[in-house]
Image: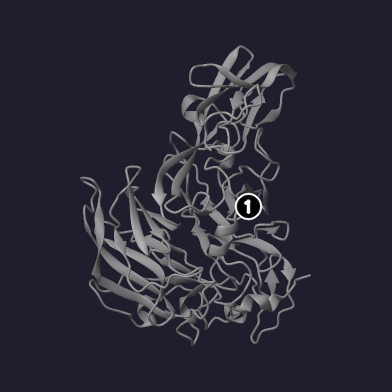
Amino acid sequence: MLRSIRRSFAPAAALTFSTLLAFARAGGAQAILPPGFSDVLITGGLRYSAAMAPLPDLRILVTEKYDARLRLVANGTLVVAPVAVIDSVRQSSESGLLGVAVDPGWPARPYVYLHYNYLGSRSIRIARYAAVGDLAYTGTGAFTLDLTSRFLVLVDLPDQYDHHNGGGMRFGADGMLYVSLGDDGDGCAAVRKDKLQGKILRLDVSQLPGGAGGPPPLANITPADNPFVADTSAEARLVWEYGLRNPYSFQIDPPTGDLFIADPGNDTYEEVDHATEPGMNFGWPSYEGRLPTGMSCPLLDTLTAIAPMYAYDRTEFLQGAAVITSPRYRRPAAGAFRFPAEYEGDVFVTDVGEGFLRRLHFNGTSWAIATPVPGQPAPEDWAQNMDGVTDFFIHPDGSLWYLKYAERFANLSGQLRKITCDNSVGVLPHAADELWLAAPYPSPAWSQATLSFSLARAGRARLAVLDLAGREIARLVDDADLPASRHTRMWDLRDARGQRAAPGLYFAVLEAGGRRLSRTLLVVR
């Protein structure tokens, strides 16, 4: 039973997204993945990174939430100087610089759109800025935003509480700008079409004048084919989907135009919604996941509520929960790191607090956890140790890029990382003759390290830890006969005499079937 459905309508509601990040499990930076996949650091040094947007040339813009800074990653390197520091941004709890999107006409239309909490009138704003600098990426790729060019697209969006702001922004293949807004503590507003809370909005910004200004009349940014264009409310005409609680994370599937919306729950369920057509009602506050809440609101429409494509129980998590979704995986025709063919059309789902990555597969009629691949860390979890992930995108080379808010919640520890498939060297995740040794985790290790490996065939194996001089420090598997399976060993960072290993770099070495694999491990105090 729900403890208090009305609790989400109050300022002290549940764990906020930012508070949750501060309580998520501590873990190493490297994800635990199935055999044949690798987790690669692209760049670090970000400060509480909330969202990202790729440019057509694959430079990446990243928002730093609390400092209201927009950062640029070019050629895999974080550019030192910020692209912009946005003024008058309210920075508390879930508030700050939340979302970013790049105009699809870049660089001919050198516009960057930002979603942020405005300090002056306690509201949410959507603003457009013009970029200046190396727009065509002919040199270093660095550019800045001309802050005097600010054009206010939407202003005075409800923001009575620090939480439930939404914050996602994406351009669809149709050229329209999609914007997510949370219910702002007013669940009943989510189901009212004349209120913008708890919605995905769809805006046509292509005809806005250049230069500073705004806001325009709502009619000037209303697409003619939005689902409620005949409504008497100008606000309703902007609505694309509704009945959402706090859709911070959503993705658009370019081939179909479908939306995949991650909607955090209140007490019981986190959910992912599949929007296959405009004007769908996803049930909040009538439903949390598939569970009726008993909430009664004026004008509440319960008959049209759409069940989520996937939901999971959040009550089992000690650290709280906040669901985040990837785009639907579309396998490129060619690409050094593309995933195997059976991943086509799958969606990955993670949880900020728990750090799992689950793979959802559509069987033609419904979505469910995909059949586990050999060596994945748990039957439901395709990957683990991915705490604090806030955003994803699929690179044209087939790799899955993701943004981490922070590492062990330290300042300037946000990261941009990617998951690659090692088919570039002919190793598939389920190769029949595979011997596999995972990267030790956490690394750096401060109290213990976990070493995972798998044998394709039963036989004798040895697993040891060596120092830089090649001396054996500890032996975790001593020429033992092991079955063909996945195996895990813990190292307490002590040598054979029981002494604590000195800080430094070590090698985990696996020998089996006439082959030898090694991975590095950094030990710290």
Rendered residue at 33%/52% (across/down): 72
Instruction: Pinpoint residue 133: horizontal percent, then vertical percent.
Output: 20, 56
Most foreground residue, 86 or 179: 86
Most foreground residue, 146 or 17: 17
Rendered residue at 29%/50% (across/down): 80
Residue 164 visible (yes or no): yes
Instruction: Pinpoint residue 439: horizontal percent, then vertical percent.
Output: 55, 32
**Other residues around mark 1 within 10 Å, as few (<14) / some (14–19) / many (≥20):** many
Query: Mark 1 falls on what kind of element?
Result: loop
From this view, report whether residue 119 is shown above or below residue 382. below
Rendered residue at 61%/44% (across/down): 384
Please state if 201 lies on the left or on the right of 439 as rendered.
Answer: left
From this view, report whether residue 150 is shown above or below residue 99. below
Please state if 109 lies on the left or on the right of 165 as rendered.
Answer: left
Amino acid at the residue labelled 1: Glu
Quadrant that contains the N terminus:
bottom right
Instruction: Pinpoint residue 117: horizontal percent, then vertical percent.
Output: 42, 73
Residue 275 visible (yes or no): no
Residue extending furthest top? 514
- For label 1, the residue is 354
Instruction: Pinpoint residue 427: horizontal percent, then vertical percent.
Output: 54, 26
From this view, report whether residue 274 is shown above or below residue 386. below
Which scheme is used to colour this image of the protein?
one colour
Quarter-of-image position of residue 318: bottom right
Most foreground residue, 454 or 456: 454
Quarter-of-image position of residue 169: bottom left
